C-alpha cells in the first residue's frame, strides 16, 4: 500500500506546500518501490557502514 | 594568458563565480621569481588552476553555488587548496556549479547557467560543471571538483575532459562544504590522464583533520611514457552498464576495449552486482544526509532553486530506519564487489548513457523511452560513490552531433594506479582527448 506522503509531511510538521508535495510523490513512490524489497534481504546481523570510533587513538 | 582567456570567454561560459585576478597575478609573479632562482616546488609550479566553489579559500567568498552561502568568507583554506598552493599552483578562481553541488545540470539559479564549450546551448554536466567547462575551454589546466553521485565524472564526460574521483579517504575533504558526509569525494578535472595523475600526487595522503581520511600508503601514480597494460584483466560488464545507452556511446567504449586488446590487455566479460540496487541505496543515503545537513536553512524556502528544494524535501520525508538500512545494504554491496576484484583488475564502462543534453531538457531517450535526465546521467556513476571506489572518466569519441562521449574506468579501493595506467595507455593509443571545442 503506497505511503501517504501528505500525511507524513503534516505529521512531521514540515510545512511543505501542498503543490510542492504533489510533485514529489512520484519520485518518492518510485524510491519506495525499489528500496523496500532490498530491505527484506538484509541479514539480521549486518551492521551499517557508518564509522564511530571510541578509541581516542583512532579519532581525528 | 589564462586570465585573458577567462575575460574573453567566461561571459559566454559562466564557468566562474569568482575570478581571483589580483592574487593570481601576485602568485604568478612569485612563481616566476622562484623558478628563475631555481626553486621548483612541483610540476604544478606556475600552473593556473581553479577550484569548485565548495573549497574554502581564506578571505575569498565560498558560495557553494547557493544563495544561503552567498556571503560566506572562510577564515582558512581547504586542505586541497593548501596543497595546491604549496605545490606552487596559481589559483585563478572559484568555479560555478550546480546549487549546493546537488544536481547534474549546473544550471545555477543564482550565478547563471554554466555552458558547455562544445555547444553553448548544452549543459556541461554537474555538479562540477564550471570546472568541466573551464578545463574544456582551456581557461585553466586543472580544476578541482567534488563528486557525491558522479559530479566529477559527469562533467568530464559531457565536456570531453578527464575527471578523476579517487577512493573515499584518499584526498582530504577538510575545508570543503559538504553535501553528503559519507559520499563526497574530491578530485581533479584535467586535460589529460597524466595531468590527473600529477594532481593526485600532490593531493593524496592522510589528513588528521578529516575523519574519513585514510592512512593507506600513497602509490606512485603513473606519469612516464610507454605505459604498459599488457596482461591486465579489464572487465567489460555483461549486465547493466550497456543497457539503455546511446548506440554511439556503447560503440565508442567497445572500440576502446578493442584498443586495449591491441595493447596486450585481456578483456574479460563479467557480470557485475546489482548496480541498480546500489544506486537506490545511494539515493536514500544522499537524500537523508543532505537534508539533515541543510534542514536548518529550510525555513527560508525562497533561498533555494526548485530542483534542489524538491530533493531536500524528499529527504525530510524518509524515515531514519531507511537511512540506517541503506547503510547496512551499502556494507553488503561492498562485500559483493570485493569478490569481483578477484577476477578483474578494473572495469571499463560508459560514464554517461548520452552526450550532453540541452539546457532545460528534462528527459533523454536512449531508445527505451524517456528517462529523467538526472536519473539517466547519474545511472552509471552513482553506485561507485556508494562503494567508495576510484573511477576515472576520459574522452572516448564523439557522437554524430560532434559532442564528446566519456568512458569510465573503475578500480578496486586505492587502485588509482591501475585506472590511471589504463587511462594513460588508452590516451596514448587514441586522440579523442586532443580534440578541442571550436566556435568559442
Image: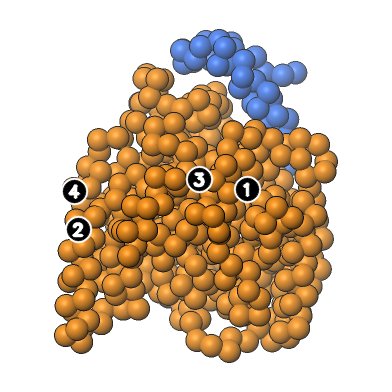
Chain colours: A blue, B orange
Crowding at dot 3, Cα within 10 Å, few <14 / some 14-19 / many 20+, comes out as many
Same chain? Circles 3 and 4: yes
Q: Secondary structure at mark 4?
A: loop
Of residues B353 and B384, the one nearer the viewer is B353
Q: Which residue is mark 3?
A: B115
Q: Which mark is residue B356?
A: 1
In the shown orientation, is residue B113 left or right of residue B375?
A: left
In the shown orientation, is residue B199 left or right of residue B27?
A: right
Q: Which mark is residue B59?
A: 4
Same chain? Circles 2 and 4: yes
- Specify the quadrant of the image occupied by residue B162: bottom right
Residue under the image location 47 percent in, 43 percent down: B114
* Residue lying at the far bottom of the rendered structure: B226
Seen in the picture, residue B369 relative to B437 is either above or below; the reply is above
Q: Which mark is residue B428?
A: none
Q: Secondary structure at mark 3?
A: loop
Seen in the picture, residue A7 relative to B209 is either above or below; the reply is above
Q: Which mark is residue B23?
A: 2
Residue B438 is situated, as x and y percent measured from the top left of the image, at: 55, 59
Q: Chain of mark 3?
A: B
Looking at marks 2 and 4 on the same chain, the residue that comes earlier in the sequence is marked by: 2
Mark 2 in CB contact with mark 3 (< 8 angstroms): no
Residue B156 is situated, as x and y percent measured from the top left of the image, at: 55, 57
In the shown orientation, is residue B126 left or right of residue B237?
A: left
From the image, state whether disc 2 or disc 4 is nearer to you. Answer: 2
Of residues B286 and B51, the one nearer the viewer is B51
Residue under the image location 77 percent in, 51 percent down: B246
Amino acid at each position: 500500500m503506497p505511503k501517504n506522503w501528505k500525511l507524513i509531511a503534516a505529521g512531521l510538521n514540515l510545512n511543505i506546500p501542498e503543490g510542492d508535495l504533489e510533485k514529489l510523490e512520484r519520485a518518492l513512490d518510485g524510491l519506495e518501490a525499489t528500496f523496500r524489497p532490498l530491505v527484506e534481504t538484509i541479514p539480521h546481523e549486518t551492521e551499517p557502514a557508518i564509522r564511530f570510533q571510541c578509541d581516542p587513538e583512532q579519532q581525528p | 594568458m589564462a586570465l585573458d582567456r577567462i575575460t574573453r570567454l567566461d561571459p559566454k561560459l559562466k564557468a566562474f563565480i569568482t575570478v581571483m585576478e589580483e592574487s593570481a597575478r601576485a602568485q604568478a609573479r612569485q612563481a616566476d621569481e622562484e623558478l628563475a632562482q631555481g626553486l621548483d616546488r612541483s610540476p604544478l609550479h606556475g600552473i593556473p588552476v581553479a577550484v569548485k566553489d565548495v573549497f574554502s579559500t581564506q578571505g575569498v567568498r565560498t558560495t557553494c553555488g547557493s544563495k544561503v552561502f552567498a556571503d560566506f568568507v572562510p577564515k582558512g583554506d581547504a586542505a586541497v587548496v593548501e596543497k595546491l598552493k604549496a605545490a606552487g599552483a596559481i589559483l585563478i578562481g572559484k568555479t560555478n556549479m550546480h546549487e549546493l553541488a546537488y544536481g547534474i545540470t549546473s544550471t545555477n539559479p543564482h550565478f547563471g547557467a554554466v555552458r558547455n564549450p562544445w555547444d553553448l546551448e548544452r549543459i556541461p554536466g554537474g555538479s562540477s560543471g564550471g570546472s568541466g567547462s573551464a578545463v574544456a575551454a582551456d581557461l585553466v589546466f586543472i580544476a578541482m571538483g567534488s563528486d557525491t553521485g558522479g559530479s566529477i565524472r559527469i562533467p568530464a564526460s559531457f565536456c570531453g575532459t578527464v575527471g578523476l574521483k579517487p577512493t573515499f579517504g584518499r584526498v582530504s575533504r577538510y575545508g570543503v562544504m559538504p553535501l553528503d558526509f559519507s559520499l563526497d569525494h574530491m578530485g581533479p578535472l584535467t586535460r589529460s590522464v597524466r595531468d590527473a595523475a600529477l594532481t593526485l600526487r600532490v593531493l593524496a595522503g592522510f589528513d588528521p583533520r578529516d575523519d574519513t581520511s585514510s592512512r593507506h600508503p600513497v602509490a606512485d601514480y603513473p606519469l612516464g611514457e610507454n605505459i604498459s597494460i599488457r596482461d591486465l584483466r579489464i572487465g567489460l560488464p555483461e549486465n547493466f552498464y550497456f543497457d539503455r545507452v546511446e548506440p554511439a556511446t556503447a560503440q565508442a567504449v567497445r572500440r576502446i576495449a578493442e584498443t586495449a586488446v591491441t595493447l596486450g590487455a585481456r578483456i574479460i566479460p563479467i557480470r557485475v552486482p546489482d548496480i541498480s540496487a546500489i544506486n537506490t541505496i545511494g539515493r536514500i543515503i544522499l537524500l537523508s544526509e543532505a537534508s539533515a545537513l541543510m534542514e536548518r536553512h529550510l525555513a527560508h524556502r525562497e533561498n533555494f532553486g526548485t530542483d534542489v528544494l524538491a530533493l531536500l524535501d524528499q529527504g525530510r520525508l524518509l524515515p531514519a530506519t531507511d537511512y540506517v538500512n541503506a547503510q547496512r545494504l551499502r556494507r553488503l554491496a561492498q562485500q559483493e564487489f570485493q569478490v569481483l576484484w578477484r577476477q578483474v583488475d578494473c572495469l571499463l564502462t560508459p560514464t554517461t548513457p548520452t552526450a550532453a543534453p540541452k539546457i532545460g531538457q528534462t528527459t533523454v531517450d536512449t531508445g527505451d523511452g524517456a528517462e529523467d535526465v538526472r536519473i539517466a546521467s547519474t545511472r552509471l556513476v552513482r553506485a561507485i560513490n556508494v562503494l567508495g571506489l576510484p573511477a576515472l572518466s576520459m574522452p572516448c569519441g564523439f557522437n554524430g552531433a560532434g559532442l564528446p562521449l566519456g568512458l569510465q574506468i573503475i578500480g578496486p579501493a586505492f587502485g588509482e594506479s591501475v585506472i590511471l595506467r589504463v587511462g594513460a595507455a588508452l590516451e596514448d593509443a587514441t586522440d579523442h582527448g586532443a580534440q578541442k571545442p571550436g566556435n568559442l
